[in-house]
Image (tube, rainbow, N blue to C red):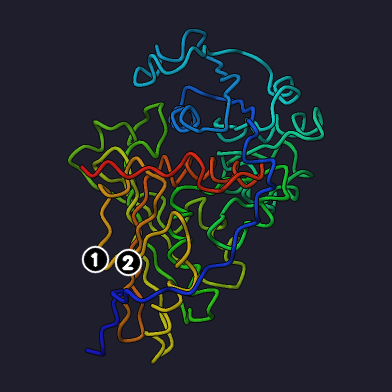
Amino acid sequence: MGKRDFYVDKSSAPAAAPQPSAPAAAHKRTVRAAIVGGTGYGGMELLRLLLEHPQVKVTAITSRTETGAVGDVHPHLRGLTKLAFSSERAADLARENDVLFFATPHGVSAKETPAVLDASETVKVVDLSGDFRLADPALYEEHYGKPHAHPERLGEAVYGAPECGRRAEIAGARLVANPGCHAYASLLAIWPLSQAGLVDGLVSIASVTGSSGSGASPGKGTHHPERFASFKAYKPLHHQHVPELEAALADGVRLAFVPHSGPFSRGIHATVFVPLATGSEGAAVAAFRTAYGAEPFVRLVPETPELRAVVGSNFADIAVLAEDGLAVVMVAIDNLVKGMAGTAVQNMNLLCGLDESTGLRRPGLGL
């Protein structure tokens, strides 16, 4: 066995690249935001986070199936909002809001986002679906099973990964493609090593997600009673997040990705195996301090990260073990917050010139 190098260094970490500074006037502004598609888990989490955001007013939340009070569908939000579901067109909402969030099934945003951007010169869009994550329309059709409704608009989207070198692009964008949950957990594990030029071969990823990752509509194999007390892999080597990850890394890193269904509701735990050149183990651990030492939502932990520490929060807990030419990186996130709605709010903050962490500094549930 070679020398073990585990992340236990408590010394001051080098500062990460600074985020774009917020304009002085932005600190008191109120952002008007609407959620398109509010009955699923993504819309539900977005509303929960935005209701506590000190600089956001949620003006509307739409649904194609519901018309009553939001609290009737999301009972944990009773007494916290007087919003009711509406059927307003997204393009009409664009004229009245600063930001629109699409928390809709794949395919909806692809059809409606161009009209939204054309309806207002100032509105920003954060898309939680996969509709604008892939710039290649052929890859989109291959992995999402249908042609993209507006392939000519794919190049307008910026991939919304703030911790992975995208802050300046996000801040200047009008359309942000929020990362997929599996993809972001894995990207956070690989990014520092890729940027440091330390990846030396095929990267293998085993990622486990809770049942909420399959969405609110139950299906065969995704409904929680089918997953409880069971465990299985799905879409091995052919998941739609593979080309998304490859595009985000953009340096020829080869990936073998196998996602798994876990017998729990929320969270993702990813274990990523990264081959290193012999003798670079210390540099691999140091790369994480360099990349994430000043990040507000990445915590480098000296033990295996646990879901209970991050569920309900926007934090990503990461542990790194490097020995014998191999880095093993473990990441824990909440798939509905850091893997979805929390990062969407983080992206909105950047789009609107607010401090990036506004409305998101809350701990995990702990149990």
245 and 35: which is toward the camera: 35
| Residue 223 falls left or right of residue 120 | left
The number of numbered discs placed on residues in the rendered structure image is: 2
Q: Position of residue 18 (x, y in %)?
A: 59, 63
Q: Earlier in the sequence, mark 1 or mark 2?
A: 1
Q: Residue at x 58, y 12 (%)?
A: 86
Give the number of the disc on residue 234. Answer: none
Residue 186 to residue 23: above or below: below
Q: Quadrant of residue 325?
A: bottom left
230 and 188: which is toward the camera: 188
Q: Position of residue 34 (x, y in %)?
A: 61, 25
Q: Position of residue 279 (x, y in %)?
A: 39, 92
| Residue 81 falls left or right of residue 143 | left
Residue receiving disc 2: 319
Mark 1 Cα within 10 Å, few/some/many (few <14, many 20+)? some
Residue receiving disc 1: 303
Instruction: Please name the amino acid that badge 1 sits on.
Output: Glu
Residue 363 to residue 274: above or below: above
User: SS at mark 1?
Assistant: loop
Disc 1 and disc 2 in contact, CB within 8 angstroms: yes
Q: Position of residue 17 (x, y in %)?
A: 58, 67
Q: Residue at x 65, y 56 (%)?
A: 20
User: SS at mark 2?
Assistant: strand
Mark 2 Cα within 10 Å, few/some/many (few <14, many 20+)? many
| Residue 176 falls left or right of residue 221 | right
